[in-house]
Image (tube, helix red, strand yellow):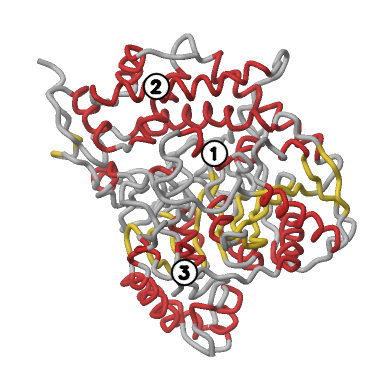
Amino acid sequence: MSIDKNTVVKIARLARLKIPDEEQQQVTGELSKILAWVEQLNEVNVDGVEPLTNVNDMCLRLRDDKVTDGNRAADILANAPSQTAGFFVVPKVVE
Amino acid sequence: MSKLTDLSMTEALAGLAKKEFSAADLAKEYIAATEKARPLNIYVTETPGLALEQATASDARRAQGTAGVLDGIPIAMKDLYCTKGVRTTASSKILENFVPTYESTVSQKLFDAGAIMLGKANLDEFAMGSSTVTSGYGPTISPWSGPDPANARRKLVPGGSSGGSAAAVSGHFAVAATGTDTGGSIRQPASVTGIVGIKPTYGRCSRWGIVAFASSLDQAGPMTRTVPDAALMLRAMCGFDPKDSTSVDQPVPDFTAAIGQSVKGLKVGVPREYRIEGLSAETDALWQKGISMLRDAGAEIVDISLQHTKYALPVYYIIAPAEASSNLARYDGVRYGLRVNGESLIDMYENTRGAGFGKEVRRRILMGTYVLSAGYYDAYYLKAQKVRRCLRNDFDEAFKKCDVVLTPTAPSTAFGIGEKEEDPIQMYLEDVFTVTLNLVGLPGISVPVALASNGLPMGLQLIGRAFDETTLFKAASALEKAAAFTAKPPFMA
């Protein structure tokens, strides 16, 4: 299946990824090619086959509902591009 | 006496135990080797100060009789493992200034065993690639490129994504290295640089603190010069970790006990579907040679079928990008990493991610976002997960007839930097023999077997049952012994 430039612009928006205008055409071609290549999976009959989501067939473990970590604000903020008074700072979102 | 850098891990540990040299002596030799290797761009960050500090502490432990199993061994750490206080980039510009405040479980286990870190080894950006060319910090040049690799006419790739690790080990710029393997990223670079690399069973090594690419496929593992070294190092890396929800609570056997054991009567499966279209005559001949070696050692060769093999790569290129697009959503310019400002919050996200991620990473995020988007999930992602089940069923059937499986590791020897760049699918085909194991969770090891007619190394891959690395090491050690591969790259420490 091939996709068009508008679809690429749409999924780039969903992925919050800026693709420069001059690259959009090339990316469209590459993604179309990869999608066409994965189409060969249509040859496989998977009727009644359960999807494999966990190779070791394990369930998520449970643990006691107790706090095991915390009080590490300085560590958590250590790599923040912008911070103030113990908060991450982002561009203004409410006018 | 030969150079200290020529000693394998097992030999270096024996020398340290006999006090023939100190951990500080060894570390100094390797720091000098690291400097010599700079034109190869093996390390994103060198840590000589830390290495000397750790070596001094190692010598003190040895003097007190409390040395660990890897005490004093200098290693390269793939720059995908978070290391406390040491910059960790995943070879991406988006993490250029990221300094973790915690240590990954596996690197901590290695330090607890006494290992010494020489630096953070280069990789394909976020481990996405088979050449180390997609690194945001430039490609790593293989020491196999020539006596002066950085000025060679055709500079060769060390494979990828663990290419810095592979180059370090093959050129003796580190005793061993850590790697990670999501589709072949330990085994393929090991094959094209003439070293040993093992991806253990999914769940053996904790993923905690390793920068995530595709969480259902990622596994850590060692890259070493010999099979016994791999057995020793893997044991130190494995073990249950409550911090990783997919870590498996299983006893970790002493893998070194399997080394040198007879393979008499061992059933070695040879899958007919791996004789793919376009398989080079030379790779095929190497494979036949490996079959003969194991047969001569007493193993029984069994013809097996893994009928869905040809679908593994397309399945992978749906599942891996899908998981990556989700994992990489965390790089948003807010909590850590690069920020590129914009007029609004959304602009800031888009600018940051557009500028911080390289081409291949952007391509995979888009691919992953597309296959998970409304209306396409069933057609791509769900379908891929179902074919993934078929791949696993193939192996479950095959392992009723055999104990291990023997295949080529990579389709060919190392290619040149800049080659295979035009068409992403050409690059993806590098992993055609390795990627299936990540999808089904099984362990695989690449063992160097011979030089091709162009003078470059080629390895063979052995595949084992889940959690049966012991049998895998037994077969790998027999193959290593029969192959007696001793070739070294033209540029060395």
Instruction: Answer yes or no: is residue B463 visible.
Output: no
Q: Is residue B439 above or below residue B134?
A: above
Label 3: few (<14), some or many (≥20) within 10 Å?
Answer: many
Front residue of B395 and B408: B408
Mark 1 chain: B
Q: CA distance from mark 3 to mark 1?
A: 32 Å
Give the residue at mark 3: B174
Q: Amino acid at mark 3?
A: Ala
Residue B323 x %, y %? 48, 30
Q: Amino acid at mark 1?
A: Ser
Residue A29: mark in rendering: 2
Front residue of B340 and B270: B270
Give the residue at mark 1: B245
Determine if marks 2 and 1 fall on one subunit: no
Front residue of B459 and B178: B459
Viewed as shown, does residue B109 lie left or right of B412?
left
